[in-house]
């Protein structure tokens, strides 16, 4: 009862791609700068592309006062969403969501008085 050679080869190719818990994998848990297709693949939670023709790469989330995008339905951003605790003050119209042009600025919802 040996495995067919093509099935054995497929299993051998898939095993390294399966991410181990808390370790970087080929599909998920990608570091900043690595190629991605979806933000869920990135440790940072942002798969970013500079233009419609560029390759998407994992990027850090936007800091306070940096440009941002609200959560995207596509999973790839032209501007990354804000870091935890910040909100993206942007036009959240359906047209902006469809055209991926609903950029804003990351702001602290508690105010910026430093307290």
Image (cartoon, rainbow, N blue to C red):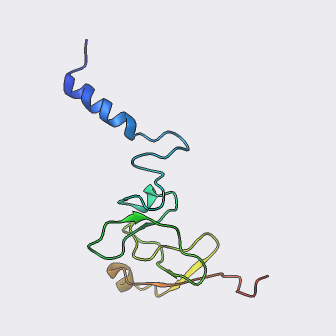
- The quarter holding residue 95 reads bottom left
Q: Residue at left 32%, top 81%?
A: 99
Relative side of 99 to 20, left or right: left
Percent position (x, y) of residue 22?
56, 44
Q: Residue at left 41%, top 58%?
A: 34
Q: Name the image quarter holding the N terminus.
A: top left
| Up/down of 53 relative to 41, above or below | below
- The quarter holding residue 36 reads bottom left
Q: Residue at left 53%, top 41%?
A: 21
Q: Name the image quarter holding the C terminus.
A: bottom right
Percent position (x, y) of residue 60?
52, 67
| Up/down of 111 relative to 80, above or below | below
Q: Residue at left 58%, top 76%?
A: 63
Percent position (x, y) of residue 91?
46, 88
| Up/down of 32 relative to 8, above or below | below
Percent position (x, y) of residue 51?
32, 76
Furthest toward the front, the residue is 33
Furthest toward the right, the residue is 115
Q: How many marks can you see? A: 0
């Amino acid at each position: 009862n040996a495995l067919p050679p093509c099935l054995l080869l497929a299993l051998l190719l898939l095993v390294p791609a399966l991410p181990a818990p808390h370790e970087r994998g080929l599909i998920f848990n990608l570091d900043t700068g690595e190629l991605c297709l979806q933000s869920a693949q990135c440790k940072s939670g942002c798969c970013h592309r500079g233009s419609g023709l560029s390759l998407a790469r994992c990027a850090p989330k936007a800091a306070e006062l940096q440009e941002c995008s609200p959560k995207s339905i596509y999973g790839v951003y032209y501007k990354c969403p804000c870091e935890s605790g910040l909100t993206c003050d942007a036009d959240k119209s359906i047209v902006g969501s469809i055209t991926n042009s609903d950029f804003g600025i990351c702001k602290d919802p508690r105010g910026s008085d430093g307290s």
